[in-house]
Image: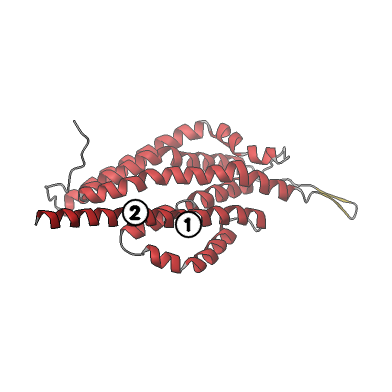
Amino acid sequence: MAFSIRDLDETQAPLLDHLVELRARLLRAFLALALAFGVCFYFAQDILAFLVQPLRAAGQSKLIYTKLYGQFFVELKVALFAAFFLAFPIIANQLWAFVAPGLYAKEKRAFLPFLIATPVLFTAGGALAYFVVMPTAFHFFLGFQGAAGGMVIEALPNSEDYLSLVMQFILAFGLSFLLPVLLLLLNRAGIVSRAQLVGARRYAIVAVFIVAAVATPPDVISQLMLAIPLLLLFESALAIMWLTERKEARESAEDASVTSTSE
């Protein structure tokens, strides 16, 4: 039996039924997040050991905490941070299950690729931050250790500050890599066209560098490592729009040809 996507559901549920369904799906998403948090908290030290590898690769072998309860909250944040990624497929599935009945079959086919591309692109951005950007940036920052005026200058990173910096890197790169998804969704919705984006390219370049400057630490290396992929992703989104427009134009021409032939 061939896979097919049904059109709009024929049932017209009242508003109260929609609210009850929304509550049920939010509850399932929350339970999935809570369960993932419990699992991740159990393995919080292992997850933290994974997150500190970029700092270790840069040559730092010590993290400190200055408050007695500091490391406990670090592990809580680590567990919650990891739990969201672990539970995201279930959360996204519940969101899709709630929204999908209100979409036409054509809209479902158009939206599904974006739903799949979102975690893939976010993971790609986070991986770039973890494996490339963070070791390079941390090596740069640790290079300022030494001596001045007879005093030893030594880096003693705080575990809370380090975790905040890691989360900033991963979220900044992960969310920034969703730029093509956002642009293509706006294009499919008819809000922006490829011609408008091409005309605004110079402003987009400036905006990309502003985002890179705000989202990353104040060093040129990290900013360039975010800005350059963002510019490439922007151009890739324009290329996909161009291919889509050519395909739609070809299909429209074929439909017109078939219609004129039948007449």
Which amino acid type is shown beneath numbered disc 2?
Thr
Residue pointed to by mark 1: 235
Mark 1 or mark 2: whose residue is earlier in sequence: 1
**Which quadrant of the view contains residue 63?**
top right
Q: How many marks?
A: 2
Please provide percent x and percent y for residue 185. Answer: 35, 56
Drawn side of residue 157 relative to residue 95, left or right: right
**Which quadrant of the view contains residue 211?**
bottom right
**Residue 66 seen from this side:** no
**Residue 48 seen from this side:** yes
Of residues 169 and 187, which is closer to you in this image?
187
From mark 1 to mark 2, how far is it between C-alphas?
Answer: 14 Å
Query: Going 53% across and 44% down the picture, which residue do you hit?
Result: 126
Query: Going 47% across and 46% down the picture, which residue do you hit?
Result: 122
The C terminus is located in which quarter?
A: bottom left
Residue pointed to by mark 2: 244
Please provide percent x and percent y for residue 152. Answer: 85, 48
Q: Secondary structure at mark 2?
A: helix
Query: Going 36% across and 64% down the picture, which residue do you hit?
Result: 193
The answer to the question of whether label 1 and label 2 lie on touching residues, with beta carbons closer than 8 A, is: no
Which amino acid type is shown beneath numbered disc 1?
Glu
